[in-house]
Image (cartoon, rainbow, N blue to C red):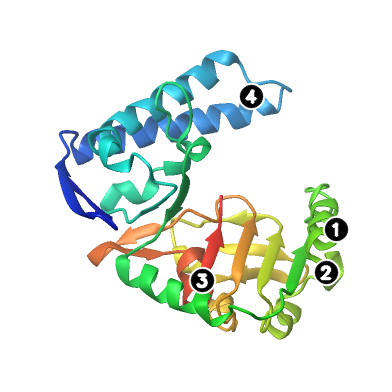
Amino acid sequence: SAVFVITPNGTGVAPLTTSSEEIRRLLYQWHTTLDASAQALATGRIPETLAERGRRVLGALYNALVLPISSMLVGCLHVVVVPYGPIHGVPFSALFDGRKYMAESLEVSVAPSLEVLRVSRERATHRAGQPLTALIVAHSDGGRLPSVVSEARAVASLLNGHCLLEDEATRDAIVRAASGHSIVHLAAHGEARLDNPTFAYVKLADGPLSVLDVFNLELDGAMVTLSACETGQSVVTGGDELVGLSRGFLYAGASTLVQS
């Protein structure tokens, strides 16, 4: 494998000595650490040993994927990563160099492909000069997510946005309201459905907002925040295509996605 680096000063390339199998092994360790941390949260605290294990895995991923090109990143403020294969699953913002996480020194974005990056940049310029408008949606799933409504109100107060809360947070309401907004913020329960990624969803008052529903949105270059579990997980199919909520929102016209 190799990393290609494109900057205003030119193009560079660096070989990677870590195999795809090793990357998959490290990602498996990362996910098992997350699962163990989720279980520990139920007891009220996460042991420092789990945190250290997570930093160790994130450090190994940094050494495998970023360290070989670190000299090319000196002076950079914003890095756009276009992964391939299993590397789509790497949490680049969280990679750890032994002192700090990448997000502490760089603005890190990830694009599924260079073509998606090009289209997203063109969409973003179409909104330049237009007034900032926001749609904020929150559904607590019957009270199981007690903080999402307060989150939505806090975001709405910052952005002077329009809220759809609890029973108002329906699929039809979002389809009707999303068009024309600069920002769409969804706070709800989410599931990736890696067994069948076209059924990945965000749960709303009248049922799941699935990938198929998202295809019907008209987002016109909006920035979309998916404040829900697993929204950034996708299945990598033949031709390095990603299938999941990300694909749906990009297809619907989002220029930027914020996901977990």
* Cβ atoms under marks 1 and 2 closer than 8 Å: yes
Q: In this view, does 134 lie above or below 147?
A: below
Q: Which amino acid does label 4 sit on?
A: Ala
CA distance for labels 4 and 3:
36 Å
Which of pointers 4 and 1 lies earlier in the amino acid sequence?
A: 4
Q: Looking at the picture, how far across and down is residue 49, in whole percent?
A: 53, 14
The residue drawn where x is 54% and y is 73% is 254
Please state which of residues 99 and 34 is positioned toward the viewer in this rendering: 99
Q: Which quarter of the picture shows residue 68?
A: top left
Q: What numbered label is drawn on residue 40?
A: 4
Along the line of sight, which residue is nearer the eye, 169 or 136?
136
Label of residue 255 in the image: 3
Q: What element carries label 1?
A: helix
Snapshot quadrant of residue 224: bottom right
In the picture provided, is 55 more to the left or to the right than 174? Answer: left
Tell me the distance, in whole angstroms, between the alpha carbons under discs 1 and 2.
Answer: 8 Å
